[in-house]
Image (cartoon, rainbow, N blue to C red):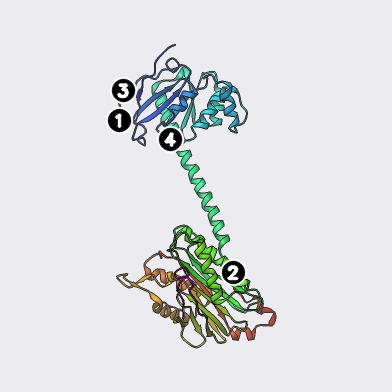
């Protein structure tokens, strides 16, 4: 029976979550004679505006971003091209009656879809929902209030489905990023060394595992233990990626036999080729510890000097007067290598400036600084803290002094050698004395 669809109908106020108009696109062979949507009395609810399309081609033109819901008459005739397009989109083969629905779902993936069927097509209606429609309506039982409710519920379900899918995709991406970042964190190569190793790493970026800070430790075949720690300026993912590149380059160059100025000059070339702008630079501290563990070479490239604690003496900073500039600041720069006597029993702590730039004091206007860090570490050493416990206590106290999370990346690396322990330990146990710690 020929009836007309008014261009708008008023929904009830049952669902207050829709504060603006909803747009319904009706697709049918004869929208003026398929079903009736009587006008509803004005209410405080959402107004539904209706558009009509007589075929899928016309529907494609009317399917704009402001459309919220599509009402598709499954009795709509479909040509061979439409059926081929629907099946060619990767859908499983199905009855021809659903070819139009498959086509609509393909061109309107973000829209809610309602299927309109005859009352005796319950099986087809259920199949339509299984294929992807949010709901179905029977043509013979349709009235305005039922349609209004179905539209609003279908839109709400579609929005919930889209939100859930985005949340799932975001969770999967976060998990994949976490696995990737964990794989990029260094594993110390200290097999055969009598040094113990510990490290702590805390990126400044929220929900990240990597920041612009980087560190590494390797033992070369001659028995020398090489350690480094560095900091790329900035805190974003680009800086984190550059830090990983510099760390991997440092390890490769170290294992290839480079050390001191030759190594840092080559690293500067890597930085200059890989950075996105000439303003990007990186600070670096490298230490190479002799096989007997009593001497070390120190190079500083604009980086804070390491802290050393020797048996029976207060911890203090290693000399830093002979350091060179940060990598990437000056072309053809040089980085002198300074010889340092370590002694028999010692602990060497290397760190990035995130550890010393946290705020302290009642007003929070002062920085902890290197002097404050040295005093803090000496207090913790006096309490008998060593190794991982010492690093945990240091990072925790810096955060407490700052009054909350630090905004800068923090990396801390600790190498120590206990001469008395080595003398007590059987020869076979010395190669197993390295404590491997991952952040």
Label 4 to label 2: alpha-carbon separation: 54 Å
SS class of the residue under badge 4?
helix
Q: Main secondary structure of the magenta part?
A: loop
Which residues, given as a range, are shown in magenta? 324-336
SS class of the residue under badge 2?
helix
SS class of the residue under badge 3?
loop
Give the numbered dot on residue 41.
3
Q: Position of residue 131 (x, y in %)?
A: 56, 30
Q: Quadrant of residue 102?
A: top right
Residue lying at the far top in this picture: please name it. Answer: 1
Asked if the residue under mark 4 is in contact with the one under mark 1, i.e. CB atoms within 8 Å, the reply is: no
Q: Is residue 156 magenta?
A: no
SS class of the residue under badge 1?
loop
Q: Is residue 98 above or below residue 172?
A: above
Residue lying at the far front in this picture: please name it. Answer: 332
Q: Position of residue 149 (x, y in %)?
A: 41, 28
Q: Which residue is mark 4?
A: 156
């Amino acid at each position: 029976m020929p009836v007309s669809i008014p261009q708008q109908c008023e929904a009830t106020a049952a669902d207050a979550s829709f504060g603006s108009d909803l747009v319904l696109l009706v697709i049918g062979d004869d929208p003026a004679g398929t079903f009736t949507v009587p006008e509803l009395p004005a209410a405080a609810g959402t107004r539904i505006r209706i558009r009509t399309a007589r075929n899928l081609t016309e529907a494609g033109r009317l399917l704009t971003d402001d459309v919220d819901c599509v009402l598709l008459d499954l009795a709509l005739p479909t040509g061979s091209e439409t059926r081929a397009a629907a099946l060619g989109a990767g859908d499983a083969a199905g009855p021809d009656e659903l070819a139009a629905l498959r086509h609509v779902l393909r061109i309107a993936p973000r829209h809610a879809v309602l299927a309109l069927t005859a009352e005796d097509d319950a099986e087809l209606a259920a199949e339509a929902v299984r294929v992807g429609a949010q709901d179905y309506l029977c043509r013979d039982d349709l009235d305005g209030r039922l349609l209004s409710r179905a539209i609003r519920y279908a839109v709400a379900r579609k929005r919930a489905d889209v939100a859930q899918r985005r949340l799932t995709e975001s969770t999967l991406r976060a998990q994949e990023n976490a696995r990737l970042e964990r794989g990029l964190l260094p594993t110390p190569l200290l097999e055969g060394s009598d040094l113990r190793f510990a490290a702590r790493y805390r990126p400044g970026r929220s929900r990240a595992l990597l920041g612009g800070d980087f560190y590494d430790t390797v033992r070369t075949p001659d028995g020398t233990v090489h350690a480094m720690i560095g900091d790329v300026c900035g805190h974003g993912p680009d800086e984190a990626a550059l830090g990983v590149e510099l760390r991997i380059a440092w390890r490769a160059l170290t294992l290839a036999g480079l050390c001191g100025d030759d190594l840092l000059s080559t690293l500067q070339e890597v930085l200059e080729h890989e950075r996105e702008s000439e303003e990007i630079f990186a600070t670096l501290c490298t230490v190479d510890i002799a096989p007997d563990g009593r001497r070390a070479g120190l190079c500083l490239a604009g980086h804070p000097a390491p802290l050393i604690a020797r048996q029976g003496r207060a911890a203090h900073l290693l000399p830093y007067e002979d350091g060179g500039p940060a990598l990437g600041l000056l072309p053809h720069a040089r980085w002198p290598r300074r010889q340092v006597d370590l002694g028999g029993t010692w602990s060497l702590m290397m760190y990035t400036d995130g550890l010393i730039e946290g705020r302290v004091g009642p007003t929070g206007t002062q920085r902890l600084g290197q002097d404050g860090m040295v005093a803090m570490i000496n207090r913790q050493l006096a309490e008998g803290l060593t190794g991982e416990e010492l690093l945990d206590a240091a990072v925790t106290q810096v955060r407490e002094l700052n009054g909350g999370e630090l905004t800068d990346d923090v990396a801390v690396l600790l190498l120590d050698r206990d001469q008395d322990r080595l003398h007590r330990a059987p020869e076979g146990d010395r190669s197993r004395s390295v404590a491997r710690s991952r952040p």
